[in-house]
Amino acid sequence: MARYTGPKCRLCRREGVKLFLKGTRCATEKCALSKRAQIPGQHFRGRSRVSDYGKHLREKQKVKRIYGLLEAQFKTYYEKAAKIPGVTGDIFLQQLESRLDNAVFSAGFASSRQAARQLIRHKKINVNGKLVDLPAYQVSANDMISYVVADSRPQEESEFPAWLAWDVKNKGVKVLRLPVREDIGYEIDEQLIVEYYSR
């Protein structure tokens, strides 16, 4: 499976916002965006004016990099969302948020989405008592996500997003409902992505 293997801090600097690709390091003073806030490259002081197409492209690239997807997979999620009745942008973000790697990251089993993806690939995560090794697996309401190692509690309960909760009885994280637009902690303008793909 193809994946981006280059420097992650470069991606944050290119988008101009913290994408938290390196987990807790991004919240410290060691973050590259805190040290150098300019666009990477020799000629970063080039054009300051961004076209409408550039705004759409940057928003798409930002969201794609947040979730760690390549273009083909990202576009497939959009095409699926466009076929479902409702607000395309909200459905699109809901599909991205309900990926298993994002749920594992949001639950606190891993410090970043890439680390969550590695846990899943290494067969360390169970969904409803069954081993799942696909990071793109879509979680549903009432699913139970647990770590293979017993008695491993990920985070404090207060840090869970509203759509996840710790289940003491089953010693896992329960998906209370599918995530909605308000559950996403990043500043994302999904309408720009819809307009980008609707050209």
Image (spheres, helix red, strand yellow):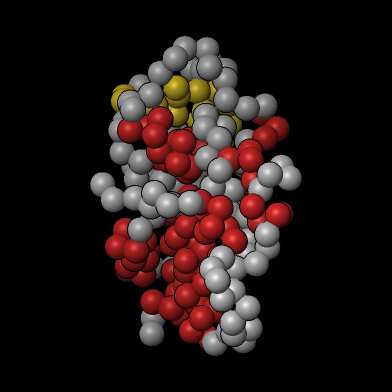
Count of number-bearing discs: 0
Is any part of residue 89 visible from this angle?
A: no
Is any part of residue 171 visible from this angle?
A: yes
Image point (47%, 75%), residue name? 57
Q: Residue furthest left?
A: 1
Q: Position of residue 196 (x, y in %)?
A: 43, 78
Q: Quadrant of residue 181?
A: bottom right
Q: Position of residue 34 (x, y in %)?
A: 71, 54
Image point (39%, 81%), residue name? 198
**Along the viewing direction, whichever of 152 and 12 lies nearer the viewer:** 12
Residue 72 versus residue 145 in the image, above or below: below
**Along the viewing direction, whichever of 13 and 195 lies nearer the viewer:** 13
**Along the viewing direction, whichever of 124 and 115 lies nearer the viewer:** 115
Image point (70%, 32%), residue name? 158
Tell me if 120 is positioned left or right of 107 in this view: left
**Along the viewing direction, whichever of 21 and 162 lies nearer the viewer:** 21
Q: Residue furthest right?
A: 29
Image point (67%, 35%), residue name? 159
Quarter of the rendering occupied by the C terminus: bottom left
Residue 73 versus residue 57 in the image, above or below: above
Tell me if 141 is positioned left or right of 131 in this view: right
Q: Position of residue 19 (x, y in %)?
A: 58, 54
Q: Residue furthest top?
A: 150
